Amino acid sequence: MKIAVIGAGYVGLVTAACFSEFGYEVICIDNNKYKIKQLKKKIIPIYEPGLSDLVKKNAKSKYLLFSNSISKIKDANIIFIAVGTPSTRRGDGEADLKFVFSVVKDISKFLIKRKKQLVITKSTVPVGTGKKIQDMMCELRPDLINNKDYFIASNPEFLREGSAIEDFMRPDRVVCGVTDKQAEEILKELYRPLNLREAPVLFADLESAEIIKYASNAFLALKVSFINEIANLCEKTGGNVQMIAKGMGLDNRIGPKFLHPGPGFGGSCFPKDTRALYASFKKNKINNTLVKSVINFNEDRKISIVNKIKNLLKPKIKNKVIAFLGVTFKPNTDDLRESPSLEIIPRLRKLGAKIHAHDPAFNPEFIKVKELDKIKWHSNVLEAIKNADLLVIHTEWNEYRGLDLLKVKKALKNPIILDLRNIFNLDDMKRYNIKYHGIGFKS
Ligand code: UDX
């Protein structure tokens, strides 16, 4: 089985590396010459636990190759499209498919007659995209369509940043949208190594597979926003949101996951995919309130966190020093995309606060992100905390969980902690006489 993966970004690189781990011959293609040059030198641009070793191992054994040239797809039976589908700037954030369609045009030049090649969208694409690609191919290569020498399929990914390899190797399910039995057979063969691990491979039509991806992400985002809203109630009425999440989660129709309150969801997927799904409803003139409410609630939540911080620093926030632990949208990643911190920090600065930040994944790229170049970065946690008027835990990195609270208290000018991820517990705080504010309980 020879596989081509077009797009060496987060999804493409993980997909290529994992398939090469099964012993398939994989070529990962990207038009970014620098990225491919670095990958050929086994320099991995992505902070993803285990990815670097996987790439190095399979590049060494030649199961995994890299190229800038899309012509290499002519040797492949399976061609994954794994390029970005960012939100369009205008309108409601509809998925921008210009990169996908540009790759389809490039692919069409190199597909080979009678080779029975399967083109698969791995990128998250709105419902109807697979059909559009099919129509494009009919235009560009009618010779292939008539002889059924080429097939289209949808195979969305469900990879979480920070656990992508585990999610690929032990998925809850593999979703495949197909239009032809032959495509189904090829995909069954491709995913046989996973199927041996009892990972269910679900075969559906193209449209269902495309919607499963968006519906899954939007539903997970809904769960997060729901528990955040319940947390707001608890902060007024009493009750502990962690206990409520536990009580809810014991109902196997609800499940315990994605019921942890926080500053709101971020990342390169939930925000983009909820906007894209809402745009699909609008484009098809179907009324949608739920997905829209998830988007709006999440945006408002970041502002409510700023107000919470303002209240803790009353009577004035101007010139107060806030120690901000964690800036990434979640732990075990260096991804800042749409992290709540990117809304919260600029608003605090605008109110006159001084931000001292720490993040275990800090790298020079961080200070290229809006306003993060104007805050004070520290490589040592206690240095970041020193003389702060307030300590905010934004990202639940493990290294914050074990902080020496006596040292924290001594370092702070004012012993107040706002823990946006509830990584600490109230009893410890009482023991050290630290004023502690978590999320989702009266404090
Ligand atoms: C998500 C989906 O989980 C994954 O299946 C899809 O393929 C890509 O998008 P990812 O964006 O990497 O993965 O992160 P995820 O772990 O889902 O968290 C998304 C956001 O929700 C983060 O900001 C996280 O902090 C937040 N979150 C998640 C919560 O606030 N509470 C939770 O209980 C879970």
Image (cartoon, rainbow, N blue to C red):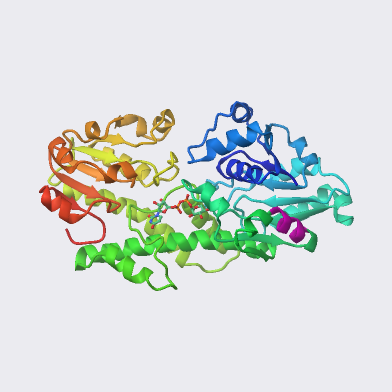
Magenta region includes residue 45 = no
Does residue 72 appear anywhere in the picture? yes
Please provide the residue range marked out in magenta. 183-190
Vertical side of 66 occupied by 1: above or below? below
Tell me if 285 is positioned left or right of 108 in this view.
left
Residue at 20% x, 68% y: name it.
237
The residue lying toward the viewer, choosing from 188 and 355, is 188
Up-down: is 178 above or below 57?
A: below
Which quadrant: the C terminus?
bottom left
- Classified by dominant secondary structure, the portion drawn in magenta counts as helix
Q: Position of residue 40 (x, y in %)?
A: 63, 28
Left or right: where 140 falls relative to 198: right
User: Is residue 189 part of the magenta span, yes or no?
Assistant: yes
Q: Is residue 19 left or right of residue 374?
A: right
Residue at 20%, 53% (x, y): give it. 437
Relative horizontal placement of residue 371, taking residue 14 as reference (left or right) = left
On the image, the x and y values in percent for residue 389 come to 16, 39
Residue 254 spot, x, y in % from top left = 42, 70
Residue at the spot 29% in from the left edge and 35% down from the top edge: 357
Note whether residue 94 is visible: no
Q: Is residue 270 above or below residue 353?
A: below
